[in-house]
């Protein structure tokens, strides 16, 4: 799938979600914060992400090699 198509689909989905809250930023942030709390088990914390570019890790090399 073309990268631009993926970005467009994400933007459309985010717009539809925003419409549900009449584009009210406070309500939208509250919605996303609630989802973040309800689905915390799906998130990766910084503590779990031990290899970063700032500590000299090879972040992104596997992606570059795949191209």
Image (spheres, rainbow, N blue to C red):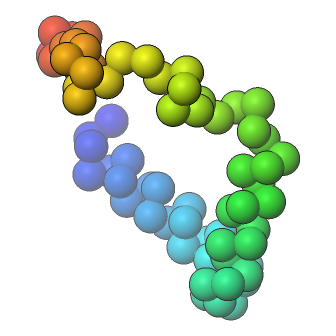
Q: Residue at x 75, y 39 (%)?
A: 40
Residue 9 image point, x, y percent: 45, 56
- The quadrant of the picture occupied by the C terminus is top left
Q: Nearer the viewer, residue 16 or 59?
A: 59
Q: Nearer the viewer, residue 58 or 20?
A: 58
Q: Is residue 61 above or below residue 34?
A: above
Image quadrant assignment for residue 28: bottom right
Q: Residue at x 37, y 59 (%)?
A: 8
Q: Residue at x 33, y 35 (%)?
A: 1
Image quadrant assignment for residue 29: bottom right
Is any atom of residue 17 visible in this view? Answer: yes
Image quadrant assignment for residue 3: top left
On screen, residue 28 versus residue 4, left or right, reads right
Residue 31 image point, x, y percent: 75, 68
Q: Residue at x 78, y 41 (%)?
A: 39
On screen, residue 47 versus residue 56, left or right, reads right
On screen, residue 22 versus residue 59, left or right, reads right
Q: Is residue 2 above or below residue 31?
A: above
Q: Nearer the viewer, residue 12 or 32?
A: 32
Is any atom of residue 63 visible in this view? Answer: no
Residue 32 image point, x, y percent: 69, 62
């Amino acid at each position: 799938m073309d990268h631009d198509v993926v970005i467009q689909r994400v933007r459309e989905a985010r717009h539809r979600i925003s419409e549900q809250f009449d584009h009210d930023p406070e309500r939208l942030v509250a919605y996303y914060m609630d989802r973040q709390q309800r689905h915390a088990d799906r998130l990766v914390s910084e503590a779990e992400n031990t290899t970063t570019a700032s500590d000299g890790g090879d972040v992104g090399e596997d992606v570059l090699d795949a191209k």
